[in-house]
Image (tube, grey):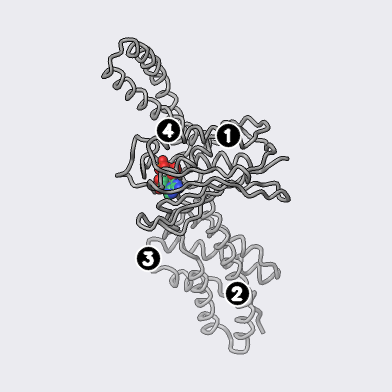
Amino acid sequence: MIDAGAWIQGNADILIQATTEALSNNRAIQSQVSEAVDGFYRALLRAIVTFDPTPLYTVLFDWVEARTGPIDQDSASLMPVLARIKRAIAEQVIHHCEPEDAVRVLLTIDRVMTDALVFLAQVETETLMAATRAQVQAAQLELEQVNKTKTDFIAIAAHELKTPLTVVEGYTSMMQSYARESSDDLLNTYVEGIEKGMGRLHELIDDVVDVSLLDLGMFDLHFQPVLLHPLLDSIQYMVNDHVLTEREITFTVDRESIPRYPTIGDPGQLLKVLEKVIMNALKYTPDGGNVLVYARDFPGFGFIDLMVEDSGIGIDPANLTRIFNAFSGVGDANLHSSGKVKFKGAGPGLGLPIAKGIIEAHGGTIWAESAGYNEETCPGSTFHIMIPMHS
Ligand code: ADP
């Protein structure tokens, strides 16, 4: 009676030769394969004799390590190799082992080889997962770097643009005094045009700087007690003065619904948010329509929901979230306008992302609701600005 260990030891040469041939018919690499197979049988023998699979696992682990490079076809699984070795052993046992010993020898080898297959599957899965994780991490890092370069570029370019702009603004202001003194109507009209264009350019550059700073997490807020009523007073003043002179829209602020107690926030930035959302409501509402600003107080939750409701063209449900992404391109590029209040005069798409960034930096949220986009039926939109209130 012979056991598996003794049988392998006694038949090592024929096992190595048969296995080498089963694994490769390329004579040029057969000596290399034979060396690896020899190492494998030594480890298998030790595992069987000592009842400890560690030596076999070490060999398999080294094979996986040697095989796995970057994820490509070269790092295919070693499972078929191990299965072929198992089959080669079985064939040799059947041919060369006494029938009364064959079953016992085969069962012992089969148990060790099955454990080896399970181990190999585990190691290969873990190795593949680690390689995939490393690739994803590298891609993420690269993406972050590209994003940072983009944002840095925008911030630097915007600052560089502001310097000459300030010089031009200075000269424009001097020209304006000169034009007024000269009472030359044509000159006054030209200077006014330049001034308007400069103002719009300044706002655009400020918006680009704001978006970059929000993106970089470098937006500075100066918190202090803020009352909403004075902010809405300035908006009302601006709308009366700059919008309602050009547009036929009913603009109402429901004062009763707005809390009279202060919140803690940055008044300048909160004013910017209200201005952007309200100006949009006016811009996307046709003449004859309404814009209403009102609030719902949630004292128990410490939030106020400030709403800007319009009877305008509405927003496609697919765009309700997208409009808050910078340069979302939701606005129709054909309608881009230098006018701030012109109906549907789309801009670069920075207003809402800035509003969102500022409100989120205050610990609040902003979102839009609309039944859909339709220029004929004008289903309207409602923007909710949820601000934490500190009474
Ligand atoms: P901009 O007005 O410069 O394009 P915004 O970020 O302010 O950029 O708005 C993004 C887009 O969201 C607009 O182009 C417009 O399509 C849509 N939008 C914003 N407010 C409204 C509104 N009240 N009604 C309909 N569409 C709106």
Return the residue nearer the eye: 55 or 383.
383
Calculate the distance from the C-alpha at mark 4 to the C-alpha at mark 3.
Answer: 85 Å
Residue at the spot of label 4:
242
Numbered mark located on residue 231 in the image: 1
Specify which label sits upstream in the sequence, 3 or 1.
3
Return the residue nearer the eye: 295 or 67.
295
Secondary structure of the residue carrying numbered label 4 = helix
Q: Nearer the viewer, mark 3 or mark 1?
A: 1
Calculate the distance from the C-alpha at mark 3 to the C-alpha at mark 1.
Answer: 83 Å
Query: How many residues crowd mark 2 within 10 Å: few (<14), some (14–19), many (20+)?
Result: some
Specify which label sits upstream in the sequence, 1 or 4.
1
Residue at the spot of label 2:
114
Residue at the spot of label 3:
26
Specify which label sits upstream in the sequence, 4 or 3.
3
Q: Which quadrant holds the C terminus? A: top right
Residue at left offset 30%, top offset 22%? 189
Q: Amino acid at mark 1?
A: Leu
Calculate the distance from the C-alpha at mark 4 to the C-alpha at mark 2.
Answer: 82 Å
Residue 277 in the image: above or below residue 204: below
Return the residue nearer the eye: 50 or 86.
86
Image marks 2 and 1: residues in contact by CB distance under 8 Å? no
Query: How many residues crowd mark 1 within 10 Å: few (<14), some (14–19), many (20+)?
Result: some
Q: Amino acid at mark 4?
A: His
Residue behind label 2 places its C-beta within 8 angstroms of ligand 1: no
Q: Which quadrant holds the N terminus? A: bottom right
Q: Nearer the viewer, mark 4 or mark 3?
A: 4
